[in-house]
Amino acid sequence: MTTEVAPNAPPPRAMHAVPGPRGWPLLGIAPRVKLESFHRQLEDWSREYGEVFAFRLGRRPFLAVSNPEVIASVLRRRPEVFRRGARLEATSREIGFLGLFSSNGDTWRRQRPMVLAGLDPAHIRSYLPAMSEITQTLRRRWLEAAQKGHEIDVLADLMRYTVDVTTCLAFGHNLNTLEASSETAIQQHLNVILPALFKRLLTPFELPRWMRNRSLRHHVVALRAEVQAFIARARAQLDERPELRERPENLIQALIAASQKGQQGITDEDVAGNVLTMLLAGEDTTAHTLAWLFWLLGRHPQAVAMARAEVDAVLPPDGVACSVEQLAGLDEVEACASEAMRLKPVAPLLMNEVGEDTEVAGVLVPKGAIVACLLRRPALDEGQFPDPQRFDPSRWRTGQPGAKSLSSAKRAVMPFGAGPRMCPGRYLAMTEVKMVTAMLLANFDLEFVGVPGRDEPAERMALTMAPVDLKMRLRLRSR
Ligand code: HEM
């Protein structure tokens, strides 16, 4: 058994002695679970039962934790003691996207440096021209919507943007869904596969025949075929221009070059798995983060005014950044994004399967149990952030008096996770978030961002947390 506890700590408690919501024999709390708002149910229970509580989902024991130090210690002890769930790993293998996100142990160790290298700041710099171009396309789309007075489906447009950026960077091919008249095939596949995956992961019982669903199978097979086509294209490029093996232009070239060299044992399966992982991990997360940020900006004109003043000072009049230096000057925009991720993190919940008996927050947790880290709870803790529900980007300004407390506050907010499995796409994601937000503020006034007839958009959880039915109306900005 592994532990990370002080020497004089009291003896650990067994899980059944830890308070938590009551369940039924065999089913546990399964009949009470609402998949789309499971994160909120857990957050509510943590208010009722405290920083550590336990329950069963089916036969599987769960321990939910919301203390930031406990969360950090769990996330640090990966991939050895805590791991991605065996079901996630098996399901991903079945679908054909066993990439960095879902793999464990040696597969994860082999893949991580490769994926990290493709997404590091140096590579992001070389991706900027493509990203600026795609941001220009989005700008044109929104200029047209503003001129015609059209309402914008925020999530749909932002997902088109992130699909275009991700496919362009990962595969060297811009799908240009922003200018396509209808949803592309890839989006249609993901719209079916992602919710099915999430449901499968949270259903308390094994669903051995889930892939027999004909529609799901169709989408999985078609998506795999799309990915194989990207791989074939990148292989041909590497054959034509062997110098790309040393200086790959995109992630797929980097992965294939490594697999051909036999470097670090990267296999063809690893390449395909990580190509799909980029699509799955990079699309919803960034689009949903931007959507929440826009909704919050729509309610806070002062924050808009400050961020816009900065955008006007740093960027050209079209508001589209084209250098790392310009993006680095957007501190206020970044502060707005950090504050949006504190209040509306798209990953408010991280599930970790226990790989060997261990101890967490003074509780004995057996192998096979799940430790659910409730990431949003510390981010809304009054002790860390006065008036925690208020959207206040000034909390994130650097060089302010109280910078020390800012650094401890930062440790309580983990939108990209923490420890050895922290999100490798965070530089790319922040680049996209800053680019799109700056473009929005430079060109448009936010006439309306919200859900008609509601104060707040509902939070819907399906792998990531999205604002439901968010709409936006833009007016050309009067300067
Ligand atoms: C605002 C946007 C994003 C957010 C909020 C986000 C958040 C996260 C979180 C919370 C994790 C789990 C970290 C952990 O277990 O400690 C994660 C993992 C991951 N993310 Fe992101 N992500 C974003 C964008 C991206 C992008 C753009 C990519 C790549 C194109 C990406 C690729 C990945 C991968 C591959 C992992 C798995 C890392 C591992 O297990 O080693 N993410 N992300």
Image: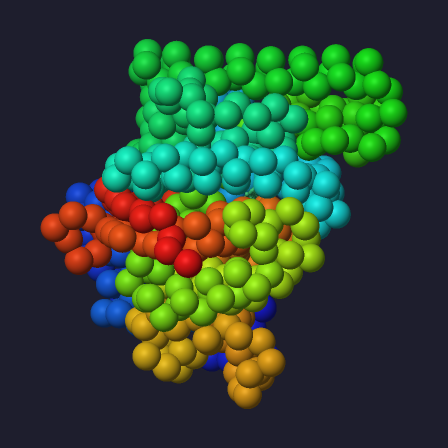
**66 or 461, which lies in front?**
461
The C terminus sits in image quarter: bottom left
**277 or 4, which lies in front?**
277
Picture quarter containing residue 169? top right
The N terminus sits in image quarter: bottom right
Q: Is residue 37 left or right of residue 274?
A: left
Residue drawn at x 69%, y 57% as measured from the top left: 325
Q: Is residue 90 left or right of residue 171?
A: left
Query: Residue 4: percent from the left, percent from the top?
Result: 58, 68
Query: Residue 342: percent from the left, percent from the top?
Result: 42, 64
Q: Is residue 238 above or below residue 20?
A: above
Residue drawn at x 49%, y 66% as measured from the top left: 309
Colour style of the rendered protein structure: rainbow
Query: Residue 77: percent from the left, percent from the top?
Result: 60, 58
Q: Is residue 234 above or below residue 50?
A: above
**163 or 223, which lies in front?**
163
Residue 232 seen by the camera: yes
Residue drawn at x 32%, y 39% as measured from the top left: 147
Query: Residue 105: percent from the left, percent from the top?
Result: 64, 41
